[in-house]
Amino acid sequence: MRERLLTGIPRERPATEQRPKERDAFFDNAKYLAIVLVAVGHAWEPLRDGSRAVSALYLLVYAFHMPAFIVVSGYFSRNFDGSPGRLRRLVTGLVVPYVVFETAYTFFTRWTDQVPDRPVSLLDPLYLTWFLVALFVWRLTTPLWQRVRHPLPLALAVAMLATLTPSIGDDLDLQRVLQFLPYFVLGLLMKPEHFQVVRRRAARVVAVPVFAGALVAAYWAVPRMSGAWFYHRDSARELGGPAWSGPVMTLVVFGCSLLLVGCFFALVPGRRTWFTALGAGTLYGYLLHGFLVQGARFWGWYGPAWVHGPLGVGAVALVAAVVVTVLCTPPVRRALRGVVEPEMRWAFRRDAVQPGRA
């Protein structure tokens, strides 16, 4: 200490005391804005009947909000190597929340849907819990996708074949797991410089007219095609199309979604904003907002005629955005960390605990 005071030269930090790498505000902003769009899309669903404009907005949002979220999820799964610590986080961060919220949504919808005998089935994800199953499967297979020669074409082939196989059924919502797989694999392949391309000013300028054109195209498509192609939960036969339409629409939808995802990323601010910190709590917002959306129907909030007009559509979107924002805040995360991100050190051997914390 005396030597440091005399020389004025600070002592170098040991390797074990290096400051943690700061989070990139861009990705936290992207996750927050994507989860807001997820909540808004769910809130708009009951307003689609009889409104072509709302259906067009709904179709536009569904064309890119989950793909964007999945691409980011894949990007941050690049370091998954199957080590004990990462497997521990896989269990505590995905399996445990899935069991908890699958059970909670089952009991909640027994009341709201008036289905008292609805069984608790961990093999048939209810409502939005399918994403936890999908992310669990995708991350487990990450080492495989990082070792094959052409991962993205292979993932697209898997998705295309899934549309030809109605016998896959609803177990673990495997249709969605397989059909959304290319977006996750794309995220695995992306590097920071790829995101820099869409963060340029030229990309932001182009993004606005592209979204405007996409909204016009969605308005045209609403009475002419099924928006269920963007849900990725059914085979071609289940959507009433010929077998060949499944692989074709997989490629068409993938191309459209990627274009809109790129435009979405172009409009995401790269600087720190008031909502940047909320990006770390998007899983909480995702898992919790469904209770309000399900309850809103039961409580009759969509009953008044004005709710189905332009003012009501805007009000519903605003309420959904505010609610999901609150659910991403630190107080909510602290209160529910025990079920969404439990430590569970008691369940694992010591060699898995320290790497998991890291």
Image: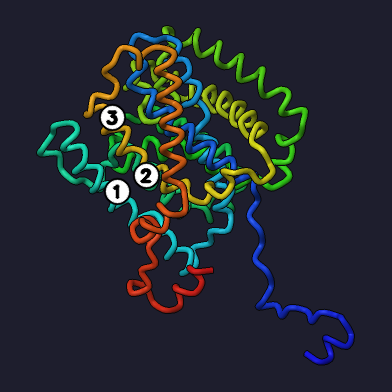
- Horizontally, is 260 left or right of 168 in the view? right
In the picture, the disc for residue 101 is 1
Q: How is the image coloured?
A: rainbow
Q: Which residue is mark 2?
A: 287
* Disc nearer the start of the sequence (2/3): 2
Identify the image quadrant of residue 174: top left
Q: How far separated are the C-alphas under marks 2 and 1?
A: 7 Å
* Disc nearer the start of the sequence (3/1): 1
- Closer to us: 13 or 9: 9
Q: Position of residue 54 (x, y in %)?
A: 43, 15
- Closer to us: 200 or 291: 291
- The image shows residue 228, relative to residue 85, as above or below, that is above
Check if mark 2's residue and mark 1's residue have beta carbons within 8 Å.
yes
In percent of the image, x 57 and y 23: which residue is there? 256
Q: Position of residue 179 (x, y in %)?
A: 44, 34
In percent of the image, x 49 and y 69: which residue is there? 357
- The image shows residue 313, relative to residue 39, as above or below, that is above
Circle 2 residues within 10 Å: few <14, some 14–19, many ≥20: many
Q: Position of residue 219 (x, y in %)?
A: 49, 10
Position of the N terminus, as image quadrant, is: bottom right
Front of the two marks 2 and 3? 3
Q: How far separated are the C-alphas under marks 3 and 1?
A: 18 Å
Q: Which residue is mark 3?
A: 296
Q: Amino acid at mark 1?
A: Phe
Circle 3 residues within 10 Å: few <14, some 14–19, many ≥20: some
Front of the two marks 3 and 1? 3
Circle 1 residues within 10 Å: few <14, some 14–19, many ≥20: many
Residue 264 in view (yes/no) = yes
Q: Amino acid at mark 2?
A: Leu
* Disc nearer the start of the sequence (2/1): 1
Q: Amino acid at mark 3?
A: Ala
In percent of the image, x 23 and y 48: which residue is there? 103
